[in-house]
Image: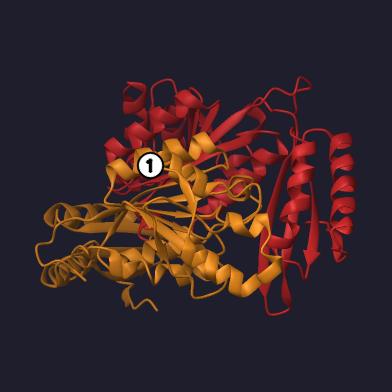
Chain colours: A red, B orange
Amino acid sequence: MGSPGGERVTAAVMIIGDEILSGRTQDTNLRDIARYLGVLGIDLAEARTVPDVHEEIVAALNALRGRYDYVITTGGIGPTHDDITADAVAAAFGVELEEHPEIMAMMRARWGDDLNAARRRMARVPVGGVLVKNPVQGPPGFMIGNVFVLAGVPTIMRGMLEDVGPRLRGGMVTIARTLRVEGSGEGTIAAPLEAVAKAHPEMSLGSYPFFNPEGFGSNLVLRSRNADELARAVADLTAALAAAGIEAVREVVEG
Amino acid sequence: MGSPGGERVTAAVMIIGDEILSGRTQDTNLRDIARYLGVLGIDLAEARTVPDVHEEIVAALNALRGRYDYVITTGGIGPTHDDITADAVAAAFGVELEEHPEIMAMMRARWGDDLNAARRRMARVPVGGVLVKNPVQGPPGFMIGNVFVLAGVPTIMRGMLEDVGPRLRGGMVTIARTLRVEGSGEGTIAAPLEAVAKAHPEMSLGSYPFFNPEGFGSNLVLRSRNADELARAVADLTAALAAAGIEAVREVVEG
């Protein structure tokens, strides 16, 4: 993974499901996919959450797949009437759906005479689609063009991701370091932070404040594709904060 | 709240922040806003997560505000250099930013001589903007046109939402009931579920499977703007599941 050329590789996530937009379910797939892509050096550039409405899924997918190197969708591939992702992806690519022989064989082995019409819905894959393994349970996902269609259930989605990674062209891996400032708010640290950000324009430097019963402060996250530049920026930022009288700074190692 | 005419009122959420797209931070604002809007009878129709990039924020905001009745943004209104939401919203509306006299007065009272340039950034509001109260801490958000610009820190965002609700024209309130099926997978319940969904086309009927150490099954969520129709649909679904031999069904009252 990681292309030495440092070319930027981009992806978008499309979360499909009324249950997210109604607030019934807290999505966690976006974060899991973002972290997984980050390790591969792929920038997650945008995410959209769309309802279980055919036209909405088709339109969003076509917008995203034309713009980014990869699109990963989650949700809507089960057996019920509201699972319409395969239909919408086929429509977006202008192809038909077909029962995939490999999924049908798996399902016949699993269900025998109980392989009803609802379950057979899950065997439908757009023509030209390639399966994405599901190591958890249930039928596989699929890939067509630059689009990966995964389950919405988080444990299954994470399992499927493991079969997505090896098919992605990785960008340069981004590395991150975090400095935690305690007892100083963003208004105090903004000036030294901005000076360092300007001196290191190729890096990402974010400030994420926290407030909790133990106190307040901010986590400053420095992110670069270049380890040397990152080390210089961390040193510069530490010095700039100290020069501004902000001493309660320590590096956080994230688990 | 709740328009008797039953007109559909729509909203979109725009989450602004590299920390969400890098996977560093788990967003929870989408769910909180979705639930808040649900109580007001407003349909959250779409959500987008965009990076801290001026052009991306402007383009997404213009797409969303033209399409939905309301847009709620979260994130990017602090004092640091990566807080560019106010600039982007002003650009989207084609207006200038100005230091809002009410925020400046608050900040002078709070900071006195420590009111530095970074903090003054947070007083900038697009011309024509109206403040959204911040009952938690720090400066207010603002509203311009059909767009509400809120903080990204969840506790502050939720506080600001309380000053958004009274300004929204509510739709008909949607009510929900949940039937929990235990020991039957989606493949088994899909047929009775679909029959009931077809018989009640004005309702939303979703199936959300669960798998955990205690067992598996699915939560069937019925949602309608009409209490009588909802009661009929719950009765129909209970009967249809029983007719399919699925007996382990109980109603879940969500907290």
**Residue A61 at x, y = what percent?**
40, 32
**Residue A137 at x, y = what percent?**
52, 49
Please state if A16 lies on the left or on the right of B76 as rendered: left
Q: Who is closer to the viewer here, B33 or B222?
A: B33
Up-down relation of residue A76 to residue A247 (above or below) = above
Up-down relation of residue B235 to residue B76 (above or below) = below
**Residue A249 at x, y = what percent?**
85, 62
Q: Which residue is mark 1?
A: B93
Report helix, strand or loop for mark 1. helix
The residue that appears at 70% across and 28% down in the rendered structure is A171
Q: Who is closer to the viewer here, B93 or B214?
A: B93
**Residue B38 at x, y = what percent?**
31, 65
The residue that appears at 32% across and 34% down in the rendered structure is A87
Q: Amino acid at mark 1?
A: Phe
Please state if B145 lies on the left or on the right of A13 as rendered: left
Q: Which quarter of the figure is the C terminus of chain A placed in?
A: bottom right
Up-down relation of residue B195 to residue A162 (above or below) = below
Residue A23: quarter of image: bottom left
Up-down relation of residue A87 to residue B100 (above or below) = above
The residue that appears at 57% across and 48% down in the rendered structure is B17
Please state if B38 lies on the left or on the right of B125 as rendered: left
Check the residue under mark 1 and report the chain it is in: B
Residue B91: quarter of image: top left
Residue B199 visible in rendering: yes
